[in-house]
Amino acid sequence: MANVFDTLKERGFIAQCTNEAELRELFDKEKVTFYIGFDPTADSLHAGHFIALMAMAHMQRAGHRPICLVGGGTGTIGDPTGRTDMRKMLTDEDIEHNCECFKKQIARFIDFSDGKAIMVNNGDWLRKLNYIDLLRDVGACFTVNRMLAAECYKQRWEKGLTFLEFNYMVMQGYDFLELNRRYGCKLEMGGDDQWSNIIAGVELNRRKNNTAVYGLTNKLLTKSDGKKMGKTAGGALWLDAEKTSPYEFYQYWRNVDDADVEKCLSLLTFLPMDEVRRLGALQDSAINEAKKVLAYEVTKIVHGEQAAEDAKKAAEAMFGGSGAGANIPEVPASVGTKLLDVMAAGKIVASKSEGRRLIQQNGVALNDVKVSDVDYVLTDEDFKDGEAILKKGKKKYYKLVK
């Protein structure tokens, strides 16, 4: 079997690694226990988590053992990484509820049967820590000047970094130490924005236990222009079917930019790389076939084969000249224009005030996604082959033509 490091590298996952040669050798020698943490900031995982779940799935398929950690402890603080303001403080009830939601979703990606994977909640040990004991146990292992230099804190300087958030790195580092002690965990994985926190855990294990452990980060899910992928007219692209319908989920991947198709096929599906490269090399209108494969495969992984089939059929009916998509009124629209202006100019609504009320009452959907922002501006991503479907109320459809 190929070394999983080579698999992850070929598919484009790997961003940074603490010691590539040693880690590659470790993968060859033994079944490695590794972990990825998910803080319960919402009641569903989203597209940004998807790439980490796929990396975890590849690791498990190669025979290694995942620990899926939900942050019942760290979630009480909130990771300041990439934030310009402090995260909303969640109640204990919210955290517990969100953790349970995460567990159900993660189980769709990872096989927990027969000890093949472990699910843990860091609240089980972090909430029991005595503050003075923690300071004496691990406090001396963290230098403030090095912590202040960490990338995860830099965006907080202007508005101020609270002491509450400053402790986050210590808690995440302590998680790695605890998981090594309990389960022999030797590797922490996560998004590249977690590099500073992961390094803290690697160093803490070395200082406290003289143990060699490793850190590996995956690339973040971004478009070819560097912007984060996974935003829709209705907000985040959620993995929960109640928050983002399978049809909406399918349509998002069906409409990705041509330049992002091969990368998404590589990172977000299990298709062999020869097939990924073949599909990614298609040009002009032929690339649409690759996008259909991408949308179907990703939806199948997240929502199941039946949901993927239903979404595919609905999309074909909508855009293929039959069903709701056939003979519906066409309205001209331009990227960069407010949807409200398009609706008024195209006589979809009698006036802008009517349009505002309709949007505020959840009566408008764009490509099956509820539009909640009255100032929503149309983007290239809203159009597939130059068209977008606007739904007014329950039964009226309009085709926005770019």
Image (spheres, rainbow, N blue to C red):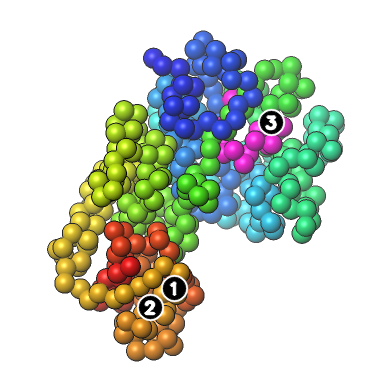
Q: Amino acid at mark 2?
A: Val
Which residues are the magenta region? Answer: 187-201
Q: Is 79 displayed left or right of 232 in the figure? A: right
Quick check: 263 left or right of 164? left
**The residue under label 3 is which amino acid type?**
Ile
Q: Mainly helix, strand or loop, the magenta region? A: helix
Q: CA distance from mark 2 to mark 1?
A: 7 Å
| Measured Cα–Cα span from mark 3 to mark 1 | 45 Å
* Dot label at residue 342: 2
Q: Residue at x 29, y 41 (%)?
A: 282
Q: Measured from the top left, where is residue 316 in percent x and y?
A: 20, 56
Tag 1: residue type? Thr
Please tell me which residue lies in front, 154 or 259: 259
- As drawn, the label of residue 43 is none
In which image quadrant can residue 372 be found?
Answer: bottom left
Location of mark 3 (residue): 199
Residue 264 in view of the camera: yes
- Let me know if residue 192 is in the magenta part: yes
Image coordinates for residue 160, horizontal then vertical, percent: 79, 56
Label 2 element class: helix
Measured along the vertical axis of the image, is residue 285 above or below residue 7? below
Q: Residue at x 38, y 51 (%)?
A: 256
Q: Residues within 10 Å of mark 1 (few under 14, many from 20)?
A: some
- Pick whichever of labels 3 and 1 is earlier in the sequence: 3
- The residue that mark 1 highlights is 337
Nearest to viewer (mark 3 / mark 1)? 1
The spot of residue 208 in percent (x, y) is 76, 22
Question: Are circles 2 and 1 on residues that touch, CB within 8 Å?
Answer: yes
